[in-house]
Image (cartoon, rainbow, N blue to C red):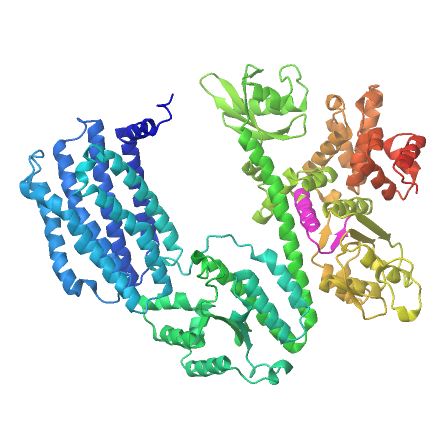
Amino acid sequence: MEYLFSIEFWTTNINNIIVHPQFLLIVFSLAFLLKIFIMFRLILHKRHSSRTGIQLTLLLLAIGGSTILNSAWIMKIFYRIFPYSLDPRFVRFWIRITWAFNTLHYHSLALFIESLVTKKDLIRNVRQKILMPISGALFTFFIVLSVVGFQQPTIRPIIELVILKIIPYYFLIPILLVSLIITAMKLRSEKIPRLLKKQFNIFIKILFIPIVTTELIHFQPIRHLYLSKRYTITCISTLLLTYVLYYFIKKIIGLRFLNLKSHVQSSIGFYFSKDFKNILEKFSNITNTRELIHITKSFFKDAFSIPIQKTHLYIRKHNYTLQDENKSPRTPDESSFETFLKSQKELGTFEKLLSKEKIVINDELTFSNFYDEDPTQTKTIIFLNHLNADIFIPVYDKHELIAYIIIERYARIGHVPKNEEFYSNLERDQMIVFANYLGNTINLIKSRNLTSIIKNEKTLKDNLHIKENENILYKEAIKTFIKHNNEKEIGIVFYKNRHFSICNQIAQTLISVNLNTHTGHPTTKIIKKIANQVLEYKSPKTCFIQNAMGEKLVVSGIPNAENNNVIITVRHPEISDVIKNKIFLQDPTTWEYILFLEKTEQGKLINQLIPGDGETIINFKVNLLKAALKNNAILLDIPEPDIIPTAELLHHISLRETLHIIDLQKPSKDITLAIKLFGINPLFGINQKDKPLFEKLSDTGTLFIKNIHFASKDIQKYIGEYLHYGFYKTFKGDRKKSSNLRIILSTNRNLKTDVQDNSFSKTLYDGIKHALISMPSLDSLPAEEISNLIIAFAKQAIKTNEFHRLLELTESEKRKLLNTPAKSLKELKAKVKNILIKKSKKHSIYEEAQFDPAYNITDPDLVEAARLGKHALKDPKIMIMLWNKFNKNQNKIANLLGVNRSSVNRRCKDYNLEK
């Protein structure tokens, strides 16, 4: 036992694993494939620049030589495992070829190191004129030796053995080490871009030092110490170098290595929009440019860790006559910029550079100009250095430069980790977004059009609100699919000679119906229909079914010609199945909402109200869900009986607490409604006991105004202003108040015509004309869609699944409903239920059928309570909700729950609701 935990035991076992030929073959094969992959990616990213093209070629040659070395090891180990599978002559031939390419590998690597920091032709210097013939002679020697000595692989000339002992030192000292020293000296003595120094630092620490270390271990004079363990050390070094190479390439490409990327890359995600909301709120309250400068400094500090004193915003004075700027003279930086811009104006080169780059970053511009010098870039770099600037950010308004932001040189050093001191591509994009919005804000301050700022702010907030809600639904929908994908439950059923054979427990669990005995069950009918179609047409068929738990399942039938039967699979649907089932929807942007309807609670509520699956109805449900996720107003144009249920549904999906309904039955010019909505100017002396609804329902409530066309034009105008700007005015007053009230409106009139006739407010119409939700008339729906609606309503009405078959609507009953079309969903539901009740009484099963008590209830809150019945009395939360929903009316609560009023009264006392 003591030996089991000893170091010697574990060292011996690990060594045995490492030296195992099969393990060595896997290691070298992985290293070979990784290097091939890296070479392929580098070739794909190769730029057309002649300078970086030469460097990239040298790097590819270096990696290619190393790849050939890996191939020689693979061949040698393979020969060791299978001695008679390869010709020993070819093995020795390839090893000698590898030594030739090893020469190319090291010389290319040395040239690549020097090429990073030099602009001269490397081949023409004296040292390379000496080394390159030597390397060429070695390359030629091994090539010739491999050809000449092909027939005698076991005989190795003395000169070959001598060269093999000397050549490693030639690789490491005259070639690699000297190149490294020369490169390091140039980095110290010459003006080299910071990005290049960072790249070289990573190159030396992460790649060069590990390569040299592992090569030294293989060389004399210590080689005899590990000769018996050469495979072990080679394996370990290969593993380390493979990882090191992968890590090096991944890390250094992010720093614009060889210009493979246009900008420095970021390793973090883009979470800018969430924090930018705070900036928008600050922008909305700006009244002068001093506040704008403060917000800019604060933003760059919070977003990019740049100290406040290192950020400077300058607004060009000769373009803008703002009061704040007229009082102060130009700073030296402003004067320098105007002089520089004037000198470049005639050539137009600086404007082209700004148009191309959007933002000028000193380090990146210096790096780009180091290899491919450009006069404009050179002058710009000198100008930035004169300003001591790390970044120059132009601010435009209608293609005119109106301001600029300067970030001081080395502003982030000491405030962020060393690996984040360069500005990434994501940070660059964030700065561009901020600059674009800043330009609009400066222009609006100039024109004093602050209401436009507020309007833009509200629009952006509304868009962010939609995205946040969509993200929540995405997570909820995807969780369901992930759960079923993890389970990977697939049931298998065979169908032959009109008989089903259940092949596994999963099939029995998912279907939960005896397909051979329950022949009239809807599930049996669908599966049997699929099986017969497969037998008849000899082609696969797929459809959806619903199990006893209400979950949708995918049933697929495949013909089995050998046994003359059908293989039926049953499984939970995947995302692609849901999309394919609704492929008739041509707009791809609606496909994500199909997932929401199928797999989220909000979607299930909509499907409960409108259970159809036809193209027209699905499009209507998608529009309904889109509207529910927004924070904008909604205008409903749907049949009268369905208006309140739809408004209740939209309110519930919005996750708001209170729904206040105002039902306008006729035109009203009374100011009572206006006061109730907005309050009134105190100068009128009207005492208002309650808070106005726009204040009372803010953040927590929904206001539904039925027949908005009956409201006075003043009320319509006030609501329209609120929809545009997010604030409302007190009636007959100028005081503005912010509110986050959700508004739903309804009308059955053509508002566009009313606006033209001056009988409806244009301000309100502009705010709701794109928010219209119009329900298709049931008369216009295809017969198939109406039939699907009828079947779905029938399933909803019957609570007990066992009676679905007995109470199933006949074709004649469906035709009767189709021949007397309903005007609304509510009317159609009532007709379906009446037929079902008559059938149940005819078969004397009315009591046993147990019709759903929530069938005629559309309020999602009340649906749950109605289905709980008397059990809802035990839930304090539900009782409080019912108490508030029915305005403390105990009789209505008792009727909903199907209990005595005394039971409700007793529970209300227990929960202290009567106080």
Position of residue 342 measured from the top left corner of the image (x, y, whole percent): 45, 83
Q: Is residue 524 left or right of residue 356?
A: right
Q: Quadrant of residue 156?
A: top left
Tell me the quarter of the picture where residue 814 sits.
top right
Can residue 449 be seen at all in this image of the molecule? yes
Q: Position of residue 273 (x, y in %)?
A: 59, 57
Residue, x 54% and y 83% (percent of image)?
Answer: 330
Residue at the (59%, 84%) spot, across then down: 328
User: Would residue 60 appear left or right of 760 to someone viewing this image?
Assistant: left
Find out whether residue 678 is within the magenta segment.
Answer: no
| Residue 526 found in image quarter | top right
Q: Which segment is the magenta one?
A: 617-638
Q: Is 464 displayed left or right of 216 in the figure? A: right
Q: Horizontal and vertical percent for residue 568?
A: 54, 23
Q: Position of residue 326 (x, y in %)?
A: 61, 85
Query: Which corner quadrant holds the C terminus?
Result: top right
